[in-house]
Image: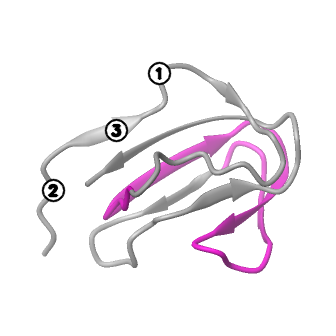
Amino acid sequence: MQYGSSFHGTDSIKTSVANEEILPTASKFYKFSLMNEGDSTVSINGSDPIFLKSGIGFSTDQSDVYVKSFKFLEDNIQYFWVGGR
């Protein structure tokens, strides 16, 4: 079981810029949740494109791999996230 020490996330709804890293530099999150307000594709930890349906979002917990990188591959997708590290 993973035990974290803090939570981090957006302070408001953000708008994506294609291929821009949305996580703080040198961070890794053992728990991570994101909600997207438009159909989009993303790259997580350098993955091939992954489709996210609008309003469904993405989440991990302590039994999953750390999330170290998260990028939207399109512009103008509204989103917010929270993570534990």
Depth check: 73 or 2 in front? 73
Provide the residue designation for mark 3. 8
Q: Quadrant of the N terminus?
A: bottom left
Across and down, in percent, residue 8 comes to 34, 38
Q: Please give the label number shown on residue 11.
A: 1
Compared with residue 84, is residue 69 higher up or lower down, i.e. above or below?
below
As measured in the structure, the alpha-carbon distance from the residue carrying label 2 to the one carrying label 1 is: 20 Å
**Secondary structure under the numbered disc 3 in the rendered image:** strand
Q: Amino acid at mark 2?
A: Gly
- Between the C-alphas of marks 3 and 2, the distance is 11 Å
80 displayed left or right of 48: left
Instruction: Give the residues drawn in magenta, as a range.
Output: 27-56
Q: Give the quarter of the image for residue 3.
A: bottom left
Q: Which element carries disc 2, helix, strand or loop?
A: loop
The residue under label 2 is 4
Disc 1 marks a residue whose amino acid type is: Asp
Q: Nearer the viewer, residue 40 or 54?
A: 40
